[in-house]
Image: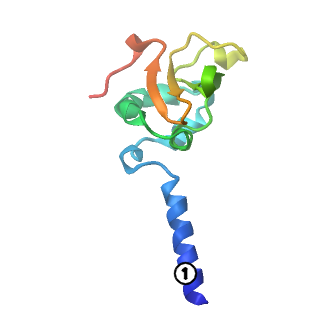
Amino acid sequence: MKLHHATLYLLLSLAILSCGVPESLSGFDSETWKADKNACKGERAKLAPEFEKIRKELQGKKEYVVRNLLGKPDKEELMERSQRIYYYYLETGEQCVGSTELSEANRAEVRINSLGKVSEVTYNNPDKITKPE
């Protein structure tokens, strides 16, 4: 009976760990990113070069990985055929003064395909992105 509980505990632990963030993305400061909703505190702007380092690694990842890493999107757009775009602001702007429309502030746009995987991660103003060193 005790062996059964140990096996169940081990399987549950593995299941929980597998739903987290891949090791290659674990160096990103996810907690600071998530705490700066709509980028109104200016913390995401500081993290933009770090985000750029992991941006391409997000392609092909499941939706839950994005949500675990970046949190709930600032805005979300539903597209045809169950596709979605998650918007994450990278700088302060109109979104910080209560606007419900998409602001012109720079933002990351994460496209989720109908299979629940990231198909593309782009910016609405790519020229404003500081490339990592």
Tell me where residue 92 appears, x and y as whole percent.
57, 18
Residue in the picture at 64% in, 24% down: 75
Report helix, strand or loop for mark 1. helix
Residue 79 visible somewhere in the drawing: no
Residue under numbered circle 1: 6
Displayed quadrant of residue 96:
top right
Structural crowding at the residue carrying mark 1, measured as other residues with C-alpha within 10 Å and reported as few (<14), some (14–19) or many (≥20): few
In-front residue for pair 90/78: 78
Tell me where residue 71 appears, x and y as whole percent.
58, 38
Residue in the picture at 62% in, 27% down: 82
Furthest residue in direction left, as rendered: 133
Tell me where residue 78 appears, x and y as whole percent.
65, 23
Q: Quadrant of the N terminus?
A: bottom right
Displayed quadrant of residue 50:
top left
Q: Amino acid at mark 1?
A: Ala
Residue in the picture at 51% in, 30% down: 43
Q: Is residue 16 above or below residue 98?
A: below
Tell me where residue 98 appears, x and y as whole percent.
73, 17
Q: Is residue 88 left or right of residue 47?
A: right
Furthest residue in direction front, as rendered: 81
Q: Quadrant of the C terminus?
A: top left
Residue 102 visible somewhere in the drawing: yes
In-front residue for pair 27/3: 3
Q: Is residue 75 above or below residue 34?
A: above
